[in-house]
Image (tube, coloured by chain):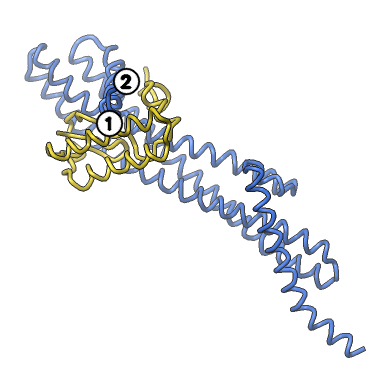
Chain colours: A yellow, B blue
Amino acid sequence: MIVRIMGEGQFEVDEEVAKGLNQLDEQSAQALEAGDRERLAELLERMAEAVRTNGARLPDEDLSPSEGIVPPPDLSLEEARELFEGEGLIPDLPSA
Amino acid sequence: MAGLMSRASLVVKAKFSKLLDRAEDPGETLDYSYEKQLELLQNVKRGIADVVTAKKRLELQETQLQQSVVKLDSQAREAVAAGREDLARQALERKSGLQQQLQTLDEQAKGLEQQQEKLVASEKALSAKVEAFRTQKETIKAQYSAAEAQVRIGEAATGIGEQMADTGLAIQRAKDKTEQMQARASAIDELTTSGALEDFTSDQTQLDRELGAIASKSQVDKELEQMKSELGSGEEKKEIGQ
């Protein structure tokens, strides 16, 4: 499946890697819920690293959508809240 | 509770579909999306230029602070030579404050450098995708019926939408960093002019401040002793000569 690391690009990863990612992903969600900034940062970095090391980078001109997006590993708790509430962190795209 | 990866995906898709909802027929959707991509490319280029400007300002300020450090150091020496330990201490205290600022500026410069790299990488990826999208949109317009086109547009638009959201975030983060840096740079300018260097530490905790003060004081004491001993031998000679 195709995974994007936000701020870095897209990678194709196999099922095994995807499985590992999903586990880390669940733990990340728990860390965010618990407001554990350090744990969240560590898990996001582990996810990004797993994708970087085991995935094949897609060329920049590829227009395939990703199945999952790994938030930027240096995401702060505040930014995470903004991101998942859908406001603030990702600015609205240029509007008419 | 859904994992963060799918939640982030949903947020990005929602941002982008909002943008596409504005256009009515497929051809229009493609052209409209392309227009927005070009706008975003302009924005990211401007973002890079802003970071470069901010970095230049930082560098200029670093040079000024370094000159002040040298000047304060020689003033302290003069003060010691003149037997004015109080003035020497003042100069060394200011010097120590400036050195702390220099360190912060250095960290900020590194932060800006990172933002710049991210922006440049993001611009490169977006450029490549925009070009691919441009080619694809003409193919889609020419070869597919409205129903088929809708599906293909959806795919291409989602793929590029993710990159647009990514680039948008990179621009936003760089902007925040640049603004923080500018606010601090203005504060330093102001404080350097008014000479109220103690206030530089106002964003630290009380403990940080006290620890900083202790470290700074012992550094000042050490330097003062060193200067006195260097010059002291001269004074002794003078006494012997009298």
x and y percentages locating residue B66 in the rendered image: 62, 59
Instruction: Tell me the element at label 1.
Output: helix
Q: Give me the chain letter of mark 2.
A: B
Q: Where, by quadrant of the figure, is residue B145 drawn?
A: top left
Residue beneath label 2, please?
A: B15
Q: Is residue B191 left or right of residue B39?
A: right
Q: Residues within 10 Å of mark 1 (few under 14, many from 20)?
A: some
Q: Residue A95, percent across and down? A: 37, 19
Name the residue located 36 percent from the left edge and 30 percent from the top edge: B168
Q: Nearer the viewer, residue B91 or B68?
A: B91
Circle number at residue A26:
1
The amino acid type found where label 2 is placed reads Lys
The three-letter amino acid code for the residue at tag 1 is Glu
Inter-mark Cα distance, 1 to 2? 24 Å
The numbered mark at residue B183 is none
Q: Residue furthest bottom?
A: B241
Q: Quadrant of the N terminus of chain B?
A: top left
x, y percentage for residue A65? 19, 28
